[in-house]
Amino acid sequence: MTIELNKEIDETRQGEATVIETTPSSNGKKLYVESYGCAMNFADSEVVASILAKEGYATTADVEEADVVLINTCSIRENAESRVRNRLTNFKSRKQRQPGLVVGILGCMAERLKKDLLEEEKLVDLVAGPDAYRDLPGLIEEVESGQKAVNVLLSRDETYADISPIRLDKNGVSSFVSITRGCDNMCSFCVVPFTRGRERSRDPQTIYNECKDLFDQGYREVTLLGQNVDSYRWNMTSKGEIKDATKPTTNFAELMDMVAGISPHLRIRFSTSHPKDMTDEVLEVIAKHENICNYIHLPVQSGNTNVLDRMNRSYTREWYLGRIEAIRRIIPDCAISTDIISGFCDETEEEHNDTISLMKEVKWDFAYMYKYSERPKTLAERRFEDNVPDDVKGKRLTEIIDLQQVHSLEANQRHVGKIQKVLIEGRSKRSEDFLAGRNDHNVKVVFPKGEFSKGDYVMVNITDCTAATLLGEVVELVNQD
């Protein structure tokens, strides 16, 4: 069970698929991609589309006309894997009607389940891990020649920095830009280090160029992506040592400073931060630039230090509270969200109550909340027993959700009566007469559409709210000249 009180679409937490948009054809073959999981997966799908476009493949939003179907998978939650299996079963029956159809899986499920899906269940024709996307044209050729095709090798160097992604998002206003791949944190509940490999940072100049190109195309917001953006280090080891003395070094604060300088009309967001690595330097850069949003997602996972130790999170409750204090001191008007896991291995009622007390102390603006589900190949699977009964997990999660609902409503009520800058992302899902966008704090704002357009910045007077959304009236269109 996963509950989120944020308004932003985040496929990791919702466990839903994102389907790519249609792009022009050049060789008559069409590619259909579904992305499950995090924003990193969606960004990867854009890289895949770019690689295959060079081989003549058009992307299509209609699966019925596709020659190649690729499912970009997620292993973070059991629910995501179940949805992917169900989807692949549907495609298997379709292959009986269309024998030439190529079906493959990409991403985090690829390495872990390659044998099951490729050989035993025969649900797919090819399997490609997160670092093998350059090989997709060759893998597809292998399948078309009657072979099964697999490449799940992880790389210490691959960042796809030289590939210009085909933008497949729906709104043309906001986009994801990957700055790192992989992860060196070994959180005991997480499978990412085993499915995406070791952490490596992308050349900052390529990141700057991609963000500038997006702005020149009309995009007005970029989200810098990494499993742990705060540990971004170009030309540095994880210990901060210089790799090549002939080249400059860049840390995350310096990278954000670079990107923010592209234009004051390009909003900068980032995800995700790790409490052990978030420095005051990063916070000071956020405070320095008006176009870096005053919003930080800082996962805590648990409010108890012993549980954090079992999770191998490398910080204590007190350290986390110290980072919260620093955020509110350096960026007084900053929204903060978090992740919370209920029912981790051996969690006692007292340890759960420490999470509740931390929630009351911090009062996050919103949160992503989960029951713990054991993932294969993680440290937790090897070291601990998943021994908190499911009904206890559910009871604790409900308590967490109910309290966060109160805090989210309180946070949104503080916006009522204020005039806030909103970037319009498109029409409201509930009515064609309303538009929707997000404010600096990453809260969804809905207002009458008037004569405004997607991509406009508007000043909105907030008149009402729910725990999830702000409602208001536009008072002014912001001049972007």
Image (tube, grey):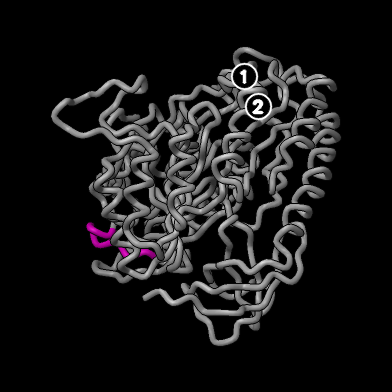
Q: Nearer the viewer, residue 327 or 57?
A: 327
Q: Answer with left or right where residue 9 lies relative to residue 367.
A: left
What residue type is disc 2 on?
Glu
Q: Is residue 442 above or below residue 192?
A: below
**Quadrant of the image occupied by residue 420:** bottom right
- Residue 381's label in the rendered image is 1
First along the sequence among labels 2 and 1: 2
Secondary structure state at the residue bearing disc 1: helix
> Does residue 55 belong to the magenta stretch?
yes
Q: Indicate the position of residue 175 as horizontal and vertical percent values.
A: 43, 58
Q: Is residue 402 above or below residue 309?
A: below
Q: Indicate the position of residue 455 as horizontal and vertical percent values.
A: 46, 72
Circles 2 and 1 in contact, beta carbons < 8 Å: yes
- Alpha-carbon neighbours of circle 1 within 10 Å: few (<14), some, or many (≥20)? some
Q: Point out the image quarter for the N terminus.
A: top right
- Alpha-carbon neighbours of circle 2 within 10 Å: few (<14), some, or many (≥20)? many
What residue is shown at x 57% (from left), y 18% (from top)?
379
What residue is shown at x 47% (from left), y 32% (from top)?
279
- Residue 374's label in the rendered image is 2
Secondary structure state at the residue bearing disc 2: loop
What residue type is disc 1 on?
Glu
> How far is the residue under mark 2 from the one under mark 1?
6 Å
- Residue 327's label in the rendered image is none
